[in-house]
Image (spheres, helix red, strand yellow):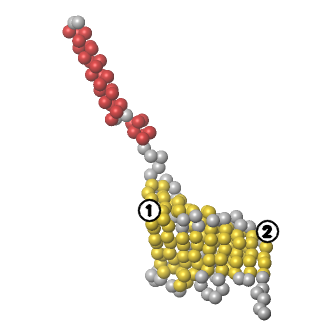
Amino acid sequence: MTRQQKHILLFLVLAILIYSIWQIFFNLEKQKSNKPFTKGYSVENLELKITDESGKLVGKFTSPGLIRYTDSELILISKPKMWTYDDAKQHWQIFSEKAEYNNKTNEINFTEELKASSILGDKKSSFTANSLLVKLDNSTAYTNNGIVFQQTPFTMSGEIAKLDMKKEILEVNDNVKAIYKSSKTQ
């Protein structure tokens, strides 16, 4: 083997070695494919207290976990529990299996097995729904997936509902059914 052939062989071995090192450490296509599909964060065992401008408690929110992806406006919440307060007394409590909070519109969409009840005053109210969109800015809630509202001795159901939680006004539309059962005293 001549000296020139040895140099060519050595050059080829070094070229293969350099290319292999580049593939392992500096290949941008490989680095891009290893990146996660999106960035985000999660919080566990969350308890959030909400106050108004004067510092008075107006709401409380708990959840065993939530997830937020930075490329989405939605925060995914598992098993949320929410309480609203009126004059520092618990007013409404809302429970669900899942919810989504939209930080752009300041709305919580309770999406699965919603149960809510009013525990303030002498007339207890409760309702169940498949989903409920709560607008936090004006304390109103909407559903178009069916609702059953109960305030003894009255029960009402319908497909579409709007609830003003401050004024305690409920509007129910589409397939409305109302039942009144009087209690008989002897």
- Say which amino acid is labelled 1: Val
| Up/down of 29 relative to 148, above or below | above
Which secondary structure lies at badge 2? loop
Mark 2 is surrounded, within 10 Å at the Cα level, by few (under 14), some (14 to 19) or many (20 or more) other residues, namely: few
- Furthest-top residue in this view: 1
**Closer to us: 116 or 103:** 116
| Disc nearer the start of the sequence (2/1) | 1
In 3D space, how far apart are the residues under numbered discs 2 and 1 (Cα atoms)?
40 Å
Taking the spot 74% from the left edge, 77% from the top edge, the residue there is 155
Quadrant containing the N terminus in the rendered view: top left
Which secondary structure lies at badge 1? strand
- Say which amino acid is labelled 2: Asn
In the image, 158: left or right of 43? right
Quadrant containing the C terminus in the rendered view: bottom right
Name the residue that disc number 1 marks. 43
- Furthest-left residue in this view: 3
- Whole-percent x, y for residue 147 in the image: 70, 70
- Whole-percent x, y for residue 174 in the image: 77, 68
In the image, 144: left or right of 33? right
Name the residue that disc number 2 marks. 175
Task: Give the label on residue 66, or none.
Answer: none
Q: Is residue 101 visible?
A: no
Taking the spot 48% from the left edge, 62% from the top edge, the residue there is 65
Mark 1 is surrounded, within 10 Å at the Cα level, by few (under 14), some (14 to 19) or many (20 or more) other residues, namely: few
Q: Are marks 2 and 1 in contact (CB under 8 Å)?
A: no
Quadrant assignment, res 116: bottom right
